[in-house]
Amino acid sequence: MNILLLLHILTIAEQKSINRAAAVLHLSQPHLSQSLHALEGELGYSLFIRSHNGVLPTEKGRLFLQHARKIISEYKKMKNLATQQAIQLLHVASTNSYIYEQAFLQTLKFYGNPSLLQFRFTNGTIDQIVNDVYQGTAQIGSILRTGEFESSWLNRLKNRHITYHSLLRLPLIITVRKDHPLIRDGQLALDGLHDYPFVDYVGTPVLQTIKEAARYADPSRIIEISSASLRHQIVASTDSFAIGFGLPSSLLDFYGLTAFPLKQSCFMGILYLKENGLTEESSTYVRFIKELIRKKYPEMTV
């Protein structure tokens, strides 16, 4: 076993395919397969299993990958001792959230412009985020979820040795442009929303993650986008509407939007592997999340 082989195994895990990994590594597929089988023989257990979702790590394979990532990270640090340069590493898997995005941006600014920087921020569903944290492709997950977490979901995290920390309970809101035809005497006529387009996200649809949204959105009137800023612009320039979580007044004013609270609440929280804990960069990211929450919701404690 050597560093190069560990990199090859990590590439298989990232690509979820031996063929794709071989192409990325500029190796032949038979050669890579032979190296994998030889390593599995040396270890005495299988690292991957084939499924309809591609090549996925076994339980022992997942633990092996966690150790492999740590070894590669330490190896890179040792290589950089000559120049005394520290690697700044932060991989975040997150649901769509203005606060999470701003916290990531502030974390990036905090570390300045080091020559060795590996920062990544990806959006996904809660299930995708849990899997990313569990498989080690994300150091930390930041989530927004409506309603209380069921005991079965929390037990699932416990069984995977994932720690969950709740940060804040937030009101759910509907956003429309300030002169929307359904606004009467300062109130929004919720019953009429079915007659207007609903702006949703591609890949992480609000209709699937927020049960309350189905009460107001007509599935035949959906505008799908992948950008939060484009979502705000569409709502601001049309009679469409969006459902999400509390936006700062500065952002509402900038786009000419107004927000109306709903009865349902949502919860902000973070996930990370218990055995790994929070890295320095992850802790900095969480600190900025808490600072943004205090600034935006001063009446709430974090």
Image (cartoon, rainbow, N blue to C red):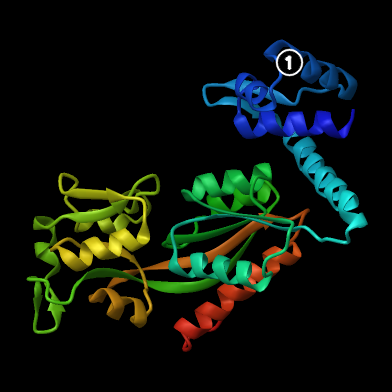
Residue 213: x percent and y percent? 27, 57
Left or right: where 132 falls relative to 62: left
- Residue at 22 percent of width and 61 percent of height: 234
Q: Nearer the viewer, residue 11 or 299?
A: 11
Q: In which quarter of the image is residue 49?
A: top right
Q: In which quarter of the image is the N terminus?
A: top right
Residue 169 shows up from this direction:
yes
Q: Quadrant of residue 50?
A: top right
Left or right: where 90 falls relative to 152: right
- Residue at 72 percent of width and 34 percent of height: 10
- Residue at 77 percent of width and 22 percent of height: 46
Say which amino acid is labelled 1. Ser
Q: In which quarter of the image is residue 232?
A: bottom left
Residue assigned mark 1: 33
Of all residues, the one furthest to the top in this rendering is 30
Residue 256: x percent and y percent? 23, 76
Residue 180: x percent and y percent? 12, 71
Q: Is disc 1 placed on a helix, strand or loop?
A: helix
